[in-house]
Image (tube, helix red, strand yellow):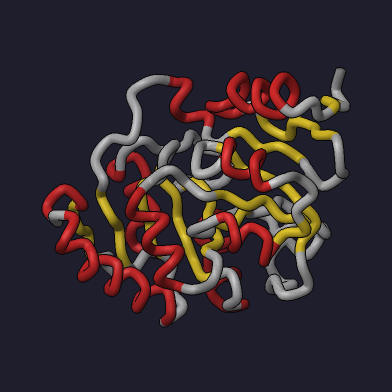
Amino acid sequence: MHPKIVKLHEFADTQQEELIHAAVASLKLGHVIALPTDTIYGIAALTQSCNAVQKLYEIKGRHQEKPVAIAVGNIEDVKRWGKVTVSDDILTDLLPGPVTLVFERTPELNPSLNPGTTLIGIRIPNHHFVRKLAKACAEPIALTSANQSSAMSSLKVEEFKSLWPHLDLVVDGGPVGDSPECRQGSTVINLSVPGQFSIIREGSAYQQTLDVLEAKYGLTNTER
């Protein structure tokens, strides 16, 4: 299988609807696709499809006990799939951006995604294409880094070429970063307990996230 590789810069904003439509169609057929985000490249599948989720884990070589986050298009979607414990002000200060917020999952979320935990990480990447795609799908996208499990994350499509044969579509957005810090991915914060937070992964927005949660809103950092 050889994926269709499309270069995002070749599509004007007004033409991206065509590409969004193609990506949605691919996902709805149960395929896994690759796309750029605001941090690193990711591979994506429809969260509510058990077969697509299984395929995502297999391509990644990822154990099902290691959780996969979901990407959504707006704040209201965060509340649909996670039991949000913080104010809208906090959500809008952090999202969209390179942050994954972890909450208790709602019953509506596919139980075959991350079956070993009641929590779910939710992202709104600060990337126009991903947000438009998530909105067009009208359901969350399971999103994980585009590399074999435990391998280095990818800042350009050539770096995960070994995965291409397993993908239906690769959206090439060009290099998404140029430093080791960029490869850290999103900052992952557990917000499942009201009034407090803990850091699961420092990621690329660690200090900015602390400034919002601790300094601005006074949430308790349980690791201090």
x 79%, y 25%: residue: 218
Residue 125 x %, y %: 47, 46
Q: Quadrant of the N terminus?
A: bottom left
Q: Nearer the viewer, residue 98 or 214?
A: 214
Residue 9 x %, y %: 16, 48
x 14%, y 56%: residue: 11
Asked if 191 appears above or below 211 in the picture, the reply is below
Residue 66 x %, y %: 71, 51
Q: Tag count in the figure?
A: 0
Residue 6 x %, y %: 20, 58
Asked if 92 appears above or below 141 in the picture, the reply is above
In the rendered image, the residue lying farthest to the bottom is 29
Q: Quadrant of the C terminus?
A: top right
Q: Nearer the viewer, residue 125 or 31?
A: 125
User: Picture quarter containing residue 81?
Assistant: bottom right
x 88%, y 27%: residue: 222
Q: Nearer the viewer, residue 119 or 152?
A: 119
Q: As drawn, is 105 to the left or to the right of 145?
A: right
Asked if 150 appears above or below 136 in the picture, the reply is above
Q: As drawn, is 135 to the left or to the right of 190?
A: left
Asked if 179 appears above or below 105 in the picture, the reply is above
